Amino acid sequence: MNLQATIAAVKKGEVKAEERVNKFLQVIQSTKEFNAYIKINDKQAKAKAVSVDHRIKDGRKTGKLAGCVVAIKDNINIKDQETTCASNILKGFISPYSATVIEKLEQEDAIIIGKTNHDEFAMGSSDENSCFGPVKNPHDPKRVPGGSSGGSAVAVALDTVDVALGSETGGSVRQPAGLTGITGLKPSYGRVSRYGLVAFASSLDQISPFAKDTADLAVLFNVIAGHDERDSTSAEIEVPDYSAYLNKDVKGMKIGIPKEYFADGLDGEIRDGILQIVEQLKAAGAEIRDVELPLSEYGVAAYYILATAEASSNLARYDGVRYGHRNKDKAGLTEMYAQTRNEGFGDEVKRRILLGTYVLSHGYYDAYYKKAQKVRRLIKNEFDSVFSEVDALITPTTPTTAFLIGERADDPLQMYLSDVYTVTANLGGICALNVRAGKDKNKLPFGLQIMANQFKEEILFQIGDFIDRKCTRYQWE
Ligand code: GLN
C-alpha cells in the first residue's frame, strides 16, 4: 500500500496509527546496527498516534498526513528537543523553537518518530563524520550509505518510517538516496522554508525530503513546500499540487542528456543503466536531445570554495557562550573560545572552517571567493540557457555505487569528487530528483538524477513517477 492509500486507510479507521508506530519502533530496534538514529521519540510518537486514532474514532478532523510516520535529520530544530547536528559542540543544546517544516508536519498530524544520524553539520558525503559513529548501508553494512543525510535515507530504506527529512547543500539527499535505492528531492532554492534548519552554507541549503518512491514523496512535499515569512529567502510563488503530476505519460517532453555527466570517471554499469532508462523514455514518446553544460567541470571547485566560506561564517557562532558545549578550564575568554571549538568540532568541520576562512581572507578573496561567485553565476546562466531548449535533464546521481567505510575517509579530495553530479543543482538554485535506476552486479543500488529549472518541481514528479512505474530496472532483482 502506498502512502496515500495508507493515510486514507488510517482516516477510515481501517488501519490504526498506533499499530503502525509500534511496528516501526520494532523495526528500529531490530536494525540498530545500521546506526541510522540519534534519538527515538517513542513516547511522543505513541501519544501522537493515539490522539490521531481517537480523533478519527470520534469523527473529528485530522490532517493530510494522519498516521504518516516521519524521521528528521538532527540539524532540524524541534522545540524542547536536543539538536546535536551530530557534533560534540552542540551536545546538550535544547532547541527553544521548531522549524517551520516541523510545525507544518505536526499540524498535518504526521508522527515524528526520531532524529537521524548524519555527517557533522551536514558536511560530508559518506556519513562517517558523525560524533555518533558512521551510518551503514542496508545493502552492505561494510559500505557507506552516502551523506550527509545518510541516517534519514537508511531510515526509509530499512522501512523504519514512511518518509524522512534531510537537508541538501550539495547533494546530501540525492546522493544517499541513490546509494541506498530510494527517492530523494533537492527542492529549488526558496521552495521550502529554511527557518529552523541549522545553517551550513545558507545560499545553498534546502530542507529536502526522502521517500520510497516519487508518489510517496509528493504527499510529503505538498505539505512542506511554500512561502514562509520567517525565511526571507523563501519564495512567494504559488505551490502546485504535485500529486496532480503523477500517473501521466512523458509524450512530447523534451529531455536533455548533458554529455559532461557521462564522461570519464562514471562507472560503466551506471552509465548503461541510466541510458537504458533514457531509451525507454524515448520509446514512450519523450524527445531526447544531446546537450552541453561545459561549465559543470568547475562545479566541485566552486562549490567547495563557496560552501566552506559560508560555513566558516555560519559556524563562528559556536563559541562556548551561546550553545551547547563549553570548555571549563577557566583560562580566559579567548582560550575558552579556542578550547571549546577545538574540543567540540570534528576534523572535517575544522578543515572547512580553515579553508573557508582562507578563501575569505584579504589577498585571497578576489582570487578564490569572488572568482567562485562568478563561476556560480555562469553555471546558473548555463542552466537557464539549456532549460530554454529542454524541460528536464537526465544524468547519473553518483559516479559509483556505495564505497567502503574508510575507503575515502583520509582523502578529502576523493570524497569531494563523489558530489560531482549533484553540486551544480545547488549552485544554480534549480531542483533535482533522484529516482531508483537499478543495481550493479554486486547488487548495490544506483540512482538516476532528473533536473529541472527553478520552481519546476512538477516536471520532476511527472518524469520520476513515470520511471518508477514504467521503466524496467537494470539488473534490479
Ligand atoms: N557532500 C557535500 C559536502 O560535503 C554536500 C553536503 C550537503 O549537501 N549537506 O559539502
Image (cartoon, rainbow, N blue to C red):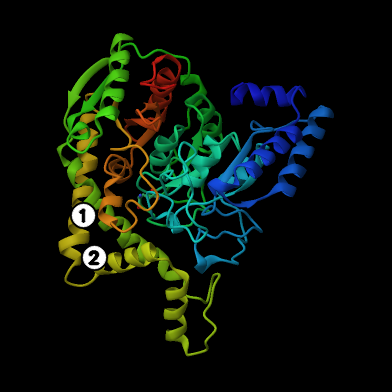
Seen in the picture, residue 411 relative to 360 is either above or below; the reply is: above
Image side of residue 47 versus residue 137, left or right: right
Q: Is residue 15 visible?
A: yes
Label 2 with label 1: CB-CB less than 8 Å: yes
- Image quarter (top left, top right, bottom left or bottom right) of the N terminus: top right
Task: Report the residue marked by disc 2.
Answer: 359
Task: Report the residue marked by disc 1.
Answer: 372
Of the residues shown, which amino acid type is indicated by label 1? Answer: Ala
Seen in the picture, residue 374 relative to 242 is either above or below; the reply is: below
Image side of residue 335 versus residue 381, left or right: right
In the image shown, does 446 or 167 lie closer to the viewer?
Answer: 446
Image coordinates for residue 8, horizontal then vertical, percent: 68, 22
Label 2 Cα crowd, 10 Å radius (few <14 / some 14-19 / many 20+): many
Q: CA distance from mark 2 to mark 1?
A: 10 Å
Q: Is residue 186 visible?
A: no
Q: Residue at x 51, y 54 (%)?
A: 75
In the image shown, does 370 or 29 lie closer to the viewer?
Answer: 29
For this orientation, the residue located farthest to the right is 58
Q: Residue at x 50, y 20 (%)?
A: 244
Label 1 Cα crowd, 10 Å radius (few <14 / some 14-19 / many 20+): many
Of the residues shown, which amino acid type is indicated by label 2? Answer: Val
Q: Quadrant of residue 310?
A: bottom left
